[in-house]
Image: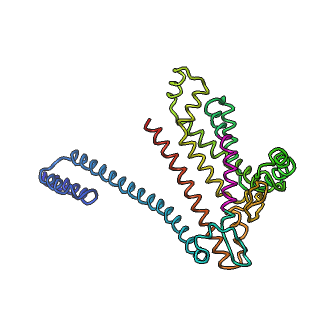
C-alpha cells in the first residue's frame, strides 16, 4: 500500500515537472524516492508558479522596452528621411546656383533665376520684431503669475494664456487682415511717420501690410509660449532662495530680480523657443506680410518669408528648377528652425539639471 501512495505522489511530481519547470526534476525524483508528503509538494509548486509569473513579467517588460525603442527610432528615421528627400529634390537648384542661392535676391520664375536672400530677410526681421515685442510682455506676465497674482486672477490669466496658444494661426491671420492691418494703416503707421519718420525703418507708404504688421501678429502668437515656459522656470526656483533673500532684508522687487537672474538660462531657452516658433509660422504671416520679394529698410513695406513663398508658389511651380528652388528654401527653413529649437531645448535642459542639483 505505501508503494502505491508513493507512486501517486510521484505522478503528481512528474506532472509538475512537465507543466512548471524542468530545473526541479532532480528534486522531484528525490521526492519520489523519499516519499515527501503532499504538503511539501504544494509548497514546491507555489515556488515554481511564482517563478513562472516572474519570468512572464520579465518577458513583457523586455517586449515593452523593445517596442518603445522601435517607436523612438521611427521618429529618428522619419526626420532623417525628410531631410534626405529634401536634399535630393533640391539637387537641381544646388547644381544651378550653388552656395550663392543663399545670398541672391533674385526670384524670377520666367528667367529661372532664383535666390533665397529676400525670404531669409523677411523671415528673420519679422521674427526679431515679434521677439522684441513679446519678450518683455511675456516676462512681465510670468513674473506676475508666479510672484504677485492672487490665486483667482492667476488661474484666470493662466487659462487665457493657454487659450491664446490653442488658437489656430488662420484665426490670427484673419484678425490681422480685418482688424490689425486697417488700424496700422490709419493710426499706427501715420503716427510713427509723423514722430519718428526721420528713421529709415519708419519711412514708406502706410499700406497696413508689411513687416511690422507681421511682427505684431507673430508677437501675439509666441507670447503664450514664452510666458508658459518662463512661468514654469520661475516656479522651479527653490522657495528657500526667496526666503533667504527676505531674511537678509531684500524687498519683494529685489527678490524677484534675484529670481530672474537665477532663471536667465531658462528664460533664454524660452525666448529662443519662441523665436523658432515665429520663424516657422506660415499662414498668419502669409496673410499680413504683403508677399513681395524685396529687401527694404522700412518696416512699412511688404516683404516675403520662407514659409510664405513655399505656401504661395509650391502648387503653381512651373518648372523643375522652380520646384527645386522652393524645396531648397524649405531645406534652409528646416535647418534654421532645427538649430534654433535644438539650442532652446539645450538651454532649458541645462537649467533644469542645475535646478535639480541645487
Name of the residue lying farthest toward the right: 186
Task: Give percent across and percent down for residue 135.
Answer: 65, 43
Task: Give percent across and percent down for residue 319.
Answer: 69, 79
Instruction: Inspect the magenta stretch and tell me whether residue 128 lies in it.
Output: yes
Q: Is residue 164 visible?
A: yes
Of residues 212 and 342, which is closer to you in this image? 212
Q: How is the image coloured?
A: rainbow
Q: Which residue is depicted at the point 59% across and 23% down?
A: 251
Type of secondary structure dominating the magenta stretch: helix
- Note whether 159 is above or below 60 in the view shown: above
Residues rendered magenta in the picture: 120-138
Task: Give percent across and percent down for residue 29.
Answer: 15, 56
Q: Quadrant of residue 298?
A: bottom right
Of residues 145 and 39, which is closer to you in this image? 145
- Note whether 358 is above or below 132 in the view shown: above
Q: Is residue 171 visible?
A: no
Quadrant for the C terminus, please.
top left
Amino acid at each position: 500500500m505505501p508503494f502505491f501512495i508513493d507512486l501517486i505522489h510521484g505522478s503528481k511530481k512528474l506532472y509538475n515537472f512537465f507543466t512548471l519547470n524542468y530545473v526541479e526534476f532532480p528534486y522531484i525524483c528525490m521526492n519520489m524516492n523519499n516519499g515527501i508528503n503532499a504538503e511539501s509538494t504544494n509548497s514546491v509548486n507555489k515556488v515554481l508558479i511564482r517563478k513562472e509569473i516572474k519570468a512572464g513579467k520579465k518577458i513583457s517588460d523586455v517586449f515593452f522596452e523593445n517596442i518603445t525603442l522601435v517607436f523612438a527610432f521611427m521618429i529618428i528615421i522619419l526626420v532623417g528621411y525628410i531631410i534626405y528627400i529634401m536634399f535630393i529634390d533640391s539637387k537641381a537648384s544646388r547644381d544651378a546656383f550653388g552656395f550663392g542661392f543663399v545670398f541672391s535676391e533674385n526670384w524670377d520664375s520666367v528667367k529661372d533665376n532664383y535666390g533665397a536672400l529676400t525670404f531669409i530677410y523677411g523671415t528673420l526681421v519679422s521674427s526679431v520684431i515679434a521677439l522684441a515685442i513679446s519678450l518683455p510682455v511675456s516676462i512681465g506676465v510670468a513674473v506676475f503669475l508666479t510672484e504677485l497674482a492672487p490665486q483667482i486672477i492667476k488661474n484666470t490669466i493662466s487659462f487665457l494664456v493657454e487659450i491664446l496658444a490653442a488658437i489656430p494661426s488662420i484665426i490670427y491671420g484673419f484678425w490681422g487682415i480685418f482688424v490689425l492691418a486697417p488700424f496700422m494703416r490709419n493710426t499706427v503707421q501715420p503716427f510713427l511717420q509723423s514722430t519718428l519718420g526721420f528713421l529709415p525703418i519708419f519711412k514708406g507708404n502706410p499700406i497696413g501690410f508689411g513687416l511690422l504688421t507681421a511682427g505684431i501678429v507673430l508677437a501675439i502668437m509666441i507670447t503664450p509660449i514664452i510666458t508658459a515656459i518662463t512661468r514654469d522656470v520661475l516656479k522651479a526656483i527653490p522657495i528657500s532662495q526667496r526666503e533667504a533673500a527676505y531674511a537678509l532684508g531684500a524687498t519683494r522687487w529685489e527678490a524677484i530680480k534675484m529670481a530672474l537672474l537665477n532663471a536667465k538660462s531658462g528664460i533664454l531657452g524660452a525666448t529662443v523657443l519662441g523665436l523658432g516658433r515665429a520663424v516657422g509660422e506660415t499662414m498668419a504671416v502669409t496673410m499680413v506680410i504683403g508677399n513681395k520679394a524685396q529687401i527694404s529698410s522700412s518696416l512699412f513695406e511688404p516683404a516675403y518669408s520662407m514659409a510664405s513663398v513655399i505656401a504661395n508658389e509650391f502648387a503653381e511651380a512651373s518648372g523643375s528648377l522652380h520646384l527645386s528652388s522652393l524645396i531648397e528654401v524649405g531645406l534652409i527653413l528646416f535647418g534654421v528652425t532645427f538649430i534654433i529649437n535644438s539650442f532652446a531645448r539645450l538651454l532649458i535642459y541645462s537649467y533644469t539639471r542645475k535646478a535639480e542639483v541645487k
